[in-house]
Amino acid sequence: MAVLLLFLTIITVHGEKAVEVRFTEISPRIDGVIEEVWQQADSAHGFVQHIPYEKAEPTEKTVVYVLEDRGNLYFAFRCNAQNHKPMVNATGDEDYVVVKMDPFGSKTTGYYFYVFASGIIWDGWLHDDGRTQDDSWEGVWYRAVKVYDDHFDVEIKIPFKSIRYKKRIGTWNVQFMRHITFNQEDDYWTEVLQVEGDLISKWGSLTGINPHATGYYFELFPEAYVRYDRDDVRDTTEFKPRLSLNVKWDVTPQTAINATIYPDFAHIESDPFTLNLDRYPTYLDERRPFFLEGKDIFRMSDFGPGKRFFEPLNIFYSRRIGRSMDGDAIPIITGLKLTNKSEVWNIGALGSYTDKFREENQVTEPQRWFGVLRAKRRIFENSDIGLMLSGTMVTRENYNYAVGVDGVYRRGASQLIIQGAVSDKNEKKGFALSSGYLGFIGNLWTMSAFEVVHDSFDVSDIGFVPWVGREKFTFYSGPYTTYSKGFVRTLYVAAGVKAVKEGGYDNWSKLGVLLLNPTFRNNWSTSLQFLVGPYYEADTNYLRKEVLLSIGGNLFNHILNLQCNYSYTYNYWRGYLGYRGYNTLFYNYSIIPQINPGLRANVWIEWDTLNTIVAVTPRLRPYILFQVTADIQLEVFSEVVMEVPGTDFRETELLSNRFGLLFAWRFLPKSWLYIALNDYREQDEQGSLQPQYRIGAVKAKYLVYF
């Protein structure tokens, strides 16, 4: 009776599914073989299909075993494959398994650990109740895979000291997932609805967990690199041997300190070329490791990737630190970051100091301090409220500060975000408000956003909110249908309106919107969107017309993603009203499991006021990826930018070419050897390509931890 009552309590408190972590004195050997020690483990089974048939029985059986010893948490997957042999392909689609866990009891934040049949691994953070995946975290953990004709086995070892967790809570939230490549099937331990996605708040429970690891976890990353810089414009050559140091100290299981001294980001890939025809600057993704890890703490709430109807108030934008100046980066002297993650609170503090930047013996950028503070508290089980302060200062008269508050309410698939901020730049003060809703209103799936940015709001030195003076309202709504049979898996049809008043004008622009978004049983998806209505910008009234199309999927290891945007709107690059098109293409194909050639391409098409094509600007980036082993990778690419006058392709000019090579070898957990080459050339006045700069770097990053 006591056992029955305990079981009922676990089911009531922690959800429908639970698996117990059992202690073992004999640690499993991580070799991909599920040996006798696993027989004492409890198991998670009864997986549910998510794709291609929601809530259906999986086509293959999956069982997960869980153990712990004094210092580690262990998982073992037994993945039966009675119908088709597991697929192993290091550069294409292959079978894999995933462990996701929330060791804080937060129901909003967690870790994920992917292990592919080839042995390749991914890891990172999950945020926003599982809606946002952040790959900036790299942990110390171990895996092994054995593949047979009728099944494959995966063993995983995660040291307690390499992750953060809340002490003495006894139960963690957990999810297990398996991907079967043959029929593009995804199976989860707990049921996942396609309209919601995999929400942390609906995971099962990992009960009886009791980490025995004690002491602090301290990581030292001494980095040694040799860099060769050839500047052909200035006719200078530099040979730069140098050392830098990165430190990470987990002061408690919830709190970590990261520091960097004279960091070098020479191996970081250059930003791709873009032709910006719009009114506002292009947002650039962060690529530098120090600013990537833990970046989610230092942002205002968002709906996750791809939800472009809403734009958050980014009062902190890490690309402002060490920003590019005429192709050279402002040197970063040091950076310090403290983060704390617990069941209720997420807290972060970041500071950085950049050096002077000189150009032709003139100081064009002074030394500057940057800082940001962030506190976020969980409310209503899986919702958040937060406060952020960001700033940069040169002197008391030269500064830029901002304070922002935000809140997000989550209930199932629905989210409501409200945020506001005030800024002060050299005594010029302003405010901004933004709000958005994504979820159901009755039976209609709805996207709505409202934004007001005061014309004195300015975070240009520390953040990214360039639409000064803008007011904006967006509303789409329509039925979202899931089909249990047939070729179509889901269908979303919506209509709505988008209204915008740009800064400096009194006229409102109004667009009617029609959206068609089907996804198919073979995991391909398509989106088609039409916008039309009276528009006002650049002192011009006109009828704006726009169509957006995207299609993507995977077919026999051919991965294709195509996006097209054609519109009749104002061209800020040319300074007139006309048609224009923007197209992006991503394609790759795994020839053999170790070699994957591909192409990333953009094509900009511009018309004049007489509807004649005046320019076509293609950017082509062919590449070849060599996956030598699960931990050794070589990528070679060439980025070519061209310009075609009108449609006369015989007169095509080659504007620039960037050749790059990056070799990366993870020889131990979090320990890497990089070799990078970068050669950039531009067209001169005579029309021939001339070298601009050449960089070669060898960099070693070695983890020392205790």
Image (cartoon, rainbow, N blue to C red):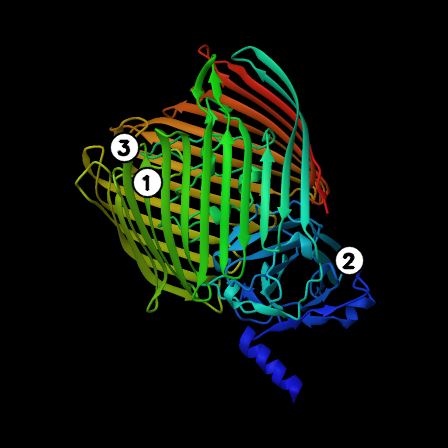
Q: Earlier in the sequence, mark 2 or mark 3?
A: 2
- Which residue is at a point 52% across and 11% down the rendered structure image? 234
Residue 246 at x, y percent in the picture: 63, 37
Q: Amino acid at mark 3?
A: Gly
Residue 622 is left or right of residue 119, and the answer is: left
Viewer-side residue, 299 vs 587: 299
Q: Residue at label 3? A: 578
123 up-or-down from 281: above or below = below
Residue 62 at x, y percent in the picture: 67, 67
> Which element carries disc 3, helix, strand or loop?
strand
> Which element carries disc 2, helix, strand or loop?
loop
- Total numbered labels: 3
Instruction: State which mark lies toward you, 1 or 3.
Output: 1
Instruction: State which mark lies toward you, 2 or 1.
Output: 1
- State the separation of the CA atoms marked 2 and 1: 55 Å
- State the separation of the CA atoms marked 1 and 3: 36 Å
- Which residue is at a point 67% across and 43% down the rendered structure image? 219
Is label 2 in contact with label 1 (beta carbons under 8 Å)?
no
Viewer-side residue, 69 vs 257: 257
Residue 336 at x, y percent in the picture: 55, 39
- State the separation of the CA atoms marked 2 and 3: 61 Å
148 up-or-down from 13: above or below = above
Q: Give residue 227's quadrant in the image.
A: top right
Residue 176 at x, y percent in the picture: 62, 63
Q: Residue at label 1? A: 423
Q: Residue at label 2? A: 32
Q: Amino acid at mark 2?
A: Gly
Residue 553 is left or right of residue 243, and the answer is: left
Residue 181 is left or right of residue 492, and the answer is: right
635 up-or-down from 204: above or below = above
Residue 699 visible in the current orientation: no
Instruction: State which mark lies toward you, 2 or 3.
Output: 2
